[in-house]
Image: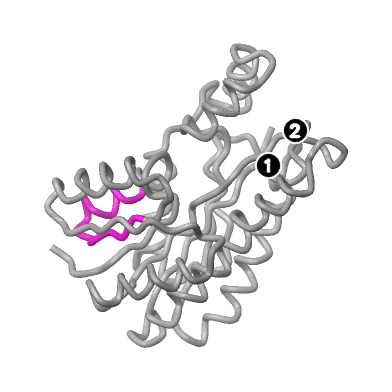
Amino acid sequence: MSNKVMIVSGGASGLGLAAAEKFAKNGYNIVLIDINDEKGKQAEAKIKGMGVDAVYCHCDISNSAQVQQAAKTTKDRFGRADVLINNAGLEVRGSILQCSEEDWIRLYDINLKGIYYMSKAFAPIMIDQGKGAIVNTGSILGYRTVGERAAYSSSKGAIDTLTRTMAFDLAQNNIRVNCVVPGAIDTPLLRGSINDSPDPAGTEAFLGSKSVFGRMGTSAEVANVMYFLASDDASFVTGAAYFVDGGWSIM
């Protein structure tokens, strides 16, 4: 078993939990960052049941003090941070005419500022140990357009640029930074968006059609790419955006 440590935001469910399970299967101890205490504790128990150590940290990633506390908890418990998965995200439906200022600010605080806070808190631990990897979670909607996603799509598009600038700046510290770009992935977040749409069945059919395979992807399929990007198998990969979209980007 490895003594390596992976930290994942939004780790209580969906892509974050799938990533935690993938890394745990490969011997990583896991730090689960989330605001859902019930699901967070359940996820912690599940990961521990896989034979590695895990800790759940209640943490709103838009709150700098809470993020710093999570980093302190990680260092105190494990003494290291090898992989950071910046995965937590928020989706708000609406055009620029429909989206409220409060929703816009909250979404950007989570989707973009959260990556800044998390990376700023955990990268110094990686620098001290001489190596690390960061994987950010973008979205196909940062590259392709659907209606009424102004805040969400623009924030996810910004993650591409942020990833490349982080990769450039942190290379001197032997820290690689990449991002995954999921397409339509069957997660609780997407299920909520489907169910909130005026025509859930039609929305689900539309999303399935946005793949050359005619289906939505799974969280595990994204987690597999996250693991690759964080592993030494990707030792010469940095600043990249890996599309895990079933071909949406080529349609």
Q: Residue at x 36, y 86 (%)?
A: 130
Residue 180 percent across, percent down from the top left: 53, 52
Q: Is residue 171 magenta?
A: no
Q: Residue at x 49, y 71 (%)?
A: 65
Q: Secondary structure at mark 1?
A: helix
Which part of the image, by quadrant, shows the C terminus?
top right
Mark 2 residue crowding within 10 angstroms, few (<14) / some (14–19) / many (20+): few
The residue at which mark 2 appears reads as 146
Residue 250 percent across, percent down from the top left: 67, 37
Q: Is residue 22 magenta?
A: yes
Q: Amino acid at mark 2?
A: Val
Residue 247 percent across, percent down from the top left: 59, 35
Q: Residue at x 32, y 47 (%)?
A: 40
Q: Is residue 81 left or right of residue 104?
A: left
The residue at which mark 1 appears reads as 141
Q: Mark 2 or mark 1, which has the lower sequence index? A: 1
The reply to whether the C-beta atoms of the residues labelled 2 and 1 are less than 8 Å apart is yes
Between 231 and 7, the one nearer to me in the picture: 7
Q: Secondary structure at mark 2?
A: loop
Query: Which region is colored magenta?
Result: 19-32
Q: Residue at x 14, y 46 (%)?
A: 49
Residue 148 sits in quarter: top right
